[in-house]
């Protein structure tokens, strides 16, 4: 969770509307609504701070003629996903202050019980700071609404320069605690929603017509830190997945700048007051995200992953008090957010030593396939190679069951419930070599189901049985989540979803590491230990039967979260490249937009 104090600061439900034990209206709701209604004033205050003043952000503006069409974002069109409240609302207002015409996208433009604010309210704030706004009703879980929404923006303004992917759904719980409705909501809104919205916008961000075509995504860095994944594997997978898209698109569409930004402190939003139910005195305002977001999209940064605080300090901001909800709170006491510091990579996490991102030779691990005799093994997948693995295991005396990959959760539960299981082996998933503009919503979902959703629910439903084994393990055919921008080749959709599967492997290894069970009130049984490892030969197919059985028969049961390769030399170089291991810090931002116009004079 973001901070230990949150467990003690949760407000008691005060409304008949509630999800489980979480209230939609609580002691912090009125305070949040006042904060969101006051965003233009907040921006006005932070705009006077050293490092965030107009002259700091655009030092060459005084040299430009008053007739210059673009100063900051003037003359540009921005679309903000998830902008009916919170961070998206703040970014929309900040871009409007910078001169952009801003389209705000949200699921509903009516006053609803699931949170304060409407798109119309945000448009009013945009207009109050002297710009032009457009409310676009757009449910990101409905592809036809995305298509229609972007069409409305183009019909009104003719072009699109900037897109911000901010829409999100938050249920930060462990593997066994996410039902299908919440799993689908998180993935459809976050990673799939960002994919479809960006895919729809890219053709309108034409080379040479957009001054500074930019896609900024509110997501953690594309980093496969085991500790980030373990506490809430589904939520982490979908949010890091948005960072993966940022990295992958930077290679696929090089005429567009792709960056991500993530809050290092808890931001005063509806997700915080509802899901986390924290005291807003220990939060920052949405300006803490919106001001650095503006700096990023007016710069020449490309393929960067930023924390908001790091970006503010790189801008030259020294005093962050104006960005706090309560100035009386010491900044060091403000709650940190999820996925801020990759502790496992720094060697400061729960596990001893530093996490490494590399394939390990399968030959370096000792195995004894004779130990499979008498074990209860389940093999899941649709390829003929997996049938060969299962047949070989059976010949060794194992009790073998097989199942086709499916995403029908009831069918999965029927297949595994009440049946003894020592190990679950999940074979290769569906592949594709097509790019973003070729893979539509149905194509994405097909890849995601095969690589991610089916994996998740077979692991979830099998876990109660696996935990009873004296040698519990889940083995998967999965690629190492190395997260380099080039590692998603040959195509973004498959590259990203197959990497998310790798994140799931790491997440289960961390959550079920047996060192100290994550505290979950709803989880009555102890999590204990379950080994979670993967095998990959670079082809995307299930490796040979001998290799897979060696993985199943590892002697060292303490090895978990490891990605084994039968022959590392045969894995393509791009699949072994390692990307970011931390956020970008101490960045020298360049005032790209104003400099461009100065050069044109």
Image (cartoon, helix red, strand yellow):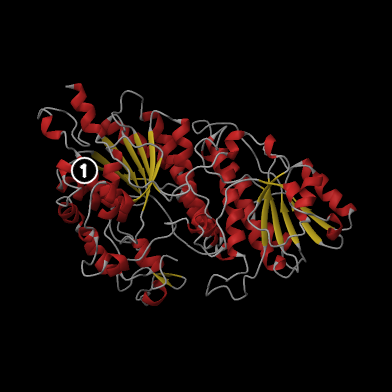
The foreground one among 399 and 447 is 399
How many dots with numbers?
Answer: 1
Residue 254 falls in image quadrant: top left
Q: Is residue 458 above or below residue 24?
A: above
| Picture layout, residue 278 above or below residue 58 | below
| Residue 201, position as x, y percentages in the image | 39, 34
Residue 62 pos. (x, y %): 11, 34
Picture coordinates of residue 433, whole percent (x, y): 60, 31
Q: Vertical placement of 7 versus 139: above or below?
A: below
Residue appearing at x 46%, y 51% in the figure:
239
Q: In this rendering, does residue 539 appear at all?
A: no
In the rendered image, residue 437, in percent from the top left (x then y), is placed at 49, 31
Q: Residues within 10 Å of mark 1 (few under 14, many from 20)?
A: many
**In the figure, residue 573 lies in which quadrant?**
top right
SS at circle 1: helix
Q: Which residue is painted at 15% across and 48% down in the image?
A: 128
Q: Quadrant of the N terminus?
A: bottom left
- Quadrant holding the C terminus: top left
Residue at 23 percent across and 48 percent down: it is 316
Relative to 599, residue 487 above or below: below
Q: Is residue 70 visible?
A: yes
The residue that mark 1 highlights is: 96
In the picture, measured across the screen, residue 365 lies left or right of residue 181, that is right
- The structure residue drawn at horizontal position 17% and vertical position 52%, both measured from the top left corner, is 49
């Amino acid at each position: 969770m973001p901070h230990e104090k949150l467990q003690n600061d949760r407000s008691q439900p005060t409304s008949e509307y509630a999800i489980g034990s979480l209230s939609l209206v609580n002691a912090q709701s009125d305070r949040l609504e006042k904060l969101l209604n006051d965003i233009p004033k907040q921006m006005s205050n932070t705009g006077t701070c050293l490092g965030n003043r107009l002259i700091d952000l655009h030092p060459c503006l005084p040299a430009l003629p008053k007739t210059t069409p673009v100063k900051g974002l003037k003359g540009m069109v921005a679309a903000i996903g998830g902008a009916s409240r919170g961070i998206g609302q703040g970014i929309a207002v900040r871009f409007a202050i910078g001169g952009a015409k801003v389209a705000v996208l949200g699921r509903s433009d009516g006053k609803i019980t699931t949170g304060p604010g409407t798109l119309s309210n945000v448009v009013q704030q945009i207009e109050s700071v002297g710009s032009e706004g457009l409310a676009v009703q757009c449910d990101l879980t409905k592809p036809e609404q995305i298509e229609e929404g972007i069409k409305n923006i183009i019909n009104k303004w003719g072009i699109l320069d900037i897109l911000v992917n901010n829409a999100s759904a938050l249920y930060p719980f462990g593997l066994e605690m996410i039902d299908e409705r919440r799993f689908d909501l998180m993935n459809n809104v976050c990673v799939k929603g960002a994919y479809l919205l960006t895919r729809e916008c890219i053709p309108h961000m034409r080379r040479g017509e957009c001054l500074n075509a930019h896609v900024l995504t509110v997501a953690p860095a594309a980093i496969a830190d085991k500790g980030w994944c373990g506490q809430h594997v589904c939520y982490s997978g979908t949010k890091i997945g948005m960072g993966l898209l940022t990295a992958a698109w930077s290679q696929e569409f090089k005429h567009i700048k792709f960056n991500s930004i993530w809050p290092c402190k808890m931001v005063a939003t509806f997700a915080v007051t509802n899901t986390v139910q924290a005291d807003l005195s220990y939060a920052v305002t949405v300006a803490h995200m919106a001001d650095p977001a503006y700096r990023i999209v007016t710069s020449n940064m490309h393929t960067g992953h930023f924390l908001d605080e790091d970006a503010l300090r790189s801008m030259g901001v020294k005093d962050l008090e104006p960005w706090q909800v309560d100035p009386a709170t010491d900044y060091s006491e403000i709650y940190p957010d999820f996925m801020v510091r990759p502790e496992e990579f720094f060697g400061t996490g729960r596990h001893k030593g530093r996490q490494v991102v590399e394939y390990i030779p399968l030959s370096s691990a000792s195995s004894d396939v004779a130990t499979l005799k008498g074990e209860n093994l389940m093999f899941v997948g649709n390829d003929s190679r997996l049938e060969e693995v299962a047949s070989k295991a059976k010949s060794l005396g194992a009790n073998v069951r097989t199942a086709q990959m499916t995403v029908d959760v009831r069918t999965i539960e029927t297949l595994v419930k009440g049946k003894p299981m020592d190990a679950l082996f999940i074979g290769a998933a569906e592949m594709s070599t097509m790019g973003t503009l070729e893979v539509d919503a149905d194509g994405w979902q097909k890849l995601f189901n095969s690589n991610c959703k089916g994996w998740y629910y077979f692991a979830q439903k099998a876990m109660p049985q696996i935990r009873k084994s004296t040698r519990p393990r889940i083995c998967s055919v999965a690629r190492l989540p190395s997260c380099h921008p080039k590692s998603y080749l040959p195509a973004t959709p498959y590259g990203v979803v197959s990497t998310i599967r790798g994140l799931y492997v790491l997440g289960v290894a961390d959550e079920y590491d047996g060192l100290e069970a994550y505290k979950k009130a709803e989880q009555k049984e102890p999590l204990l230990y379950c080994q979670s490892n993967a095998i990959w030969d670079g082809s995307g197919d299930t490796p040979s039967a001998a290799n897979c059985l060696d993985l199943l028969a590892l002697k060292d049961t303490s090895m978990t979260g490891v990605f084994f390769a039968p022959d590392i030399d045969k894995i393509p170089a791009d699949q072994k490249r390692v990307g970011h291991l931390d956020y970008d810090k101490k960045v020298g931002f360049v005032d790209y937009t104003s400099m461009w116009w100065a050069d044109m004079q």
